[in-house]
Image (cartoon, rainbow, N blue to C red):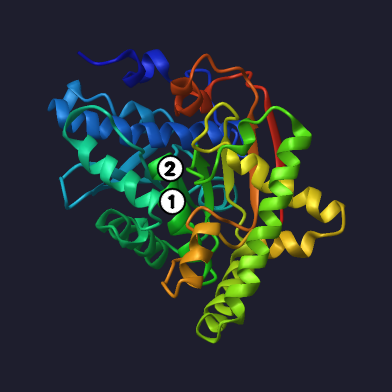
Amino acid sequence: MASEREEFSVSGPLHLDVVNWDNADHRRSVAACLVQGVYILERDRQEKRQGDEALAPPWWKFFNFKLYRQLVDDADSSIFGAVYEYTPPGCNSNELAVKCPRYVIAFRGTITKGDAFSRDLELDMHIIRNELHFSSRFETGIQAVRSVVATFGSSNIWLTGHSLGAAIAMLAGKTMAKTGVFLEAFLFNSPYLSAPVERIKDKKVKHGIRIATSVITAGLAFASSVKSNNRQKNLSRGSSFAAISRWVPCLFVNPADHICSEYIGYFEHRKKMEDIGIGAIENLATQHSVGGLFMNLLGKDSEEPMHLIPSAALTVNLTPSPDFKEAHGIHQWWRPALRLDSKTYLYS
């Protein structure tokens, strides 16, 4: 039996019968619903719900999108993503070019039900090991993004995803940004791999830990760069980090969600370091992870940390969450009357 959360008529934002594309709340809500559409596409596949029994279509049809393409994982045949085409009735081409997304590429996160769970869990481990870019799922996803951009251009193309799907969307966005293509992105509860410093209540202790971590990280980065075999790699990484700083994805996090909440401190701390005159240390530290630097010093190659980004429009949901499931869930992001704190952080 289907969960009420799967049915748009019960759980969807029915109040958004008219979407104002200039409204940030509307844009966030639609992007989240399109991700939910991918979740339900996979649940429909698992439950063999077809035709009138399928629950996924209302999640995009309500906003005048149509399903352009499903993205299927070749490892387990699960549906992990979708490409949507916006086809509003009576919208002229000029209005479409200015206000409306033309195509949206959306990626779901981990599903704990059905036969997709083991593959999703495997990819969650890839995130922890900073190896998501080696997975066939990411390769399928980035190929879809490149295909859409090559066919329709890069303007008014959106990327969106939740949790594991946000990690895929972020990696795809960074990959495209390195080629000079900056896609609008809506990333919900994207994983940030770090000790849960943000959960410390004492602000002075928290700030002290972050300063110490920045100094250690910057020191390790400098020591790593001194080694001749690492110098070129670090120069390349610094150049790459600066190059993608023009990409400003919309990042949505909940402070009660330890999977993504460290993004709050990541950006706030960088601003504080700039304010006290030691922003140069943080600008170096913010490009690296301690684990990766230790690997470099041991003579082992480490990839650029997937979760680190130079710039973002960060939105924090300050509405109290009763539990972790709610704090990490996609449903929170289309609810009306949320208490949100939004700030834009630009790398310089």
Residue designated by label 2: 161
| On screen, residue 196 above or below 312 | above
Q: Position of residue 190 (x, y in %)?
A: 49, 42
Secondary structure beneath dot 2 equals strand
| On screen, residue 11 above or below 27 | above
280 on left or right of 265: right
4 on left or right of 195: left
- Is residue 347 visible from the viewing direction of this image? no
Q: Residues within 10 Å of mark 2 (few under 14, many from 20)?
A: many
- For the point 40% across and 36% down, which residue is it? 34
Which residue occupies the extreme front position in the image?
298
Tag 2: residue type?
Answer: Gly
Residue designated by label 1: 169
- For the point 47% across and 18% down, which residue is it? 14
| On screen, residue 233 above or below 274 | below
- Is residue 118 visible from the viewing direction of this image? yes
Q: Position of residue 49 (x, y in %)?
A: 16, 25
